[in-house]
Image (tube, helix red, strand yellow):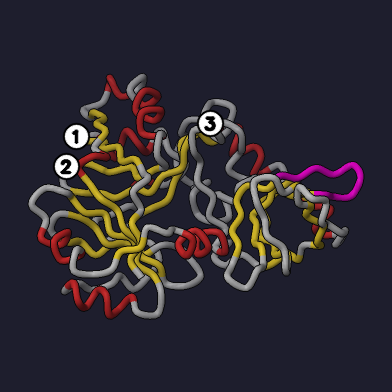
Amino acid sequence: MIINLSEFDLLAIEGVDAAKFLQGQLTCNVDAATPTHSLQGAYCNLTGRVISDMRLLPYEGGIYLLCQAGMAEILKSTLDKYIVFSKAKTKIVTEQFRRFAVLGKDSQNIFAKLGLDAPQNPGDINAIEQGFIYRLETAQPCYELLLKTEQNPLLESLKELPIEEDRSAWEMAQLISGTVHIDTESQGNYTPQVLNYDLRGLVDFKKGCYTGQEIIARMHYRGKAKKRLYLAQAKDFTISKETQLRLPEGSTGEIIRFANDTDGHGFLLAILPCDAVEQQLPMTVVDKAGKSQAITLLPITGLN
């Protein structure tokens, strides 16, 4: 299916020093982002907490930072404080693009109808005129199209195909792969380790300094994390914003993301105490009516 992903932000970092500047700001090794390979990374504050995550999409003249809706202005105002000494500039270009997801068993047929080739490996980009196709780091093949809106024949071709507005399938694919994006409400709340960013390749511990690097590196090398993000399932249970997480006495956790499948099972990504998980202590979810259900932890693919 093709899904319209209309909620996003896109910030362009332009100029000859774009990559060099970002290398000193982001958690990832910006040099690993190329015209044929995208990269996930994050920007953290001085206390090592994530302000925004993003996908880096290099292009001739700069690098696009694809992030959650509402985050481009926050990133721009923050990066502009430091970019004045670089031959680079920031520019919000969200309105110049449209974004779609392509997933499911017929993905190859969809690309064939559009006259395109799908990237083979997670993170890879197939450069196309007026945009990008890149493959996500999900358990099942899932792709995104980022297309310029002006005089783009691909957008005209897409009009001939059914486009879904329901994002639930895309949300489920992201959730099962342990993907959590930072938005305006969650910025500054979490460290990269808690969200498994260090295990998913968003943090490079061998690169040089970047904002928040000292604290992030100290947390990494001093030992085991106390809390991390886990994937869980609650069978025959519908999860909502009112659902509460119930843990053993003395333990605390937080549901970060959730989705429900068509069979009536709930799935969630939750921050849980690592000790409680290792000891296999009972954990449940409770809805607003008081109904409770035990959760079962599931493996997250793609963790280092």
Question: What type is the residue that disc 2 sits on?
Answer: Gly
The answer to whether 234 appears left or right of 180 in the picture is: right
Q: Residue at x 39, y 70 (%)?
A: 103
| Residue linked to disc 3 | 212
Q: Measure the C-alpha gap from mark 3 to mark 1.
A: 24 Å
Q: Earlier in the sequence, mark 3 or mark 1?
A: 1
Question: What type is the residue that disc 3 sits on?
Answer: Gly
Asked whether the beta carbons under mark 2 and mark 1 sit within 8 Å of each other, the answer is yes
**Mark 1 neighbour density, 10 Å: few (under 14) some (14–19) many (20 or more):** some
The answer to whether 159 appears left or right of 125 in the picture is: left
Q: Residue at x 33, y 42 (%)?
A: 65
Q: Which residues are the magenta region?
A: 246-254
Residue 175 location, x and y as percent?
A: 55, 59
| Residue linked to disc 1 | 15
Residue 258 location, x and y as percent?
A: 61, 54
| Residue linked to disc 2 | 61
The answer to whether 122 appears left or right of 146 in the picture is: right
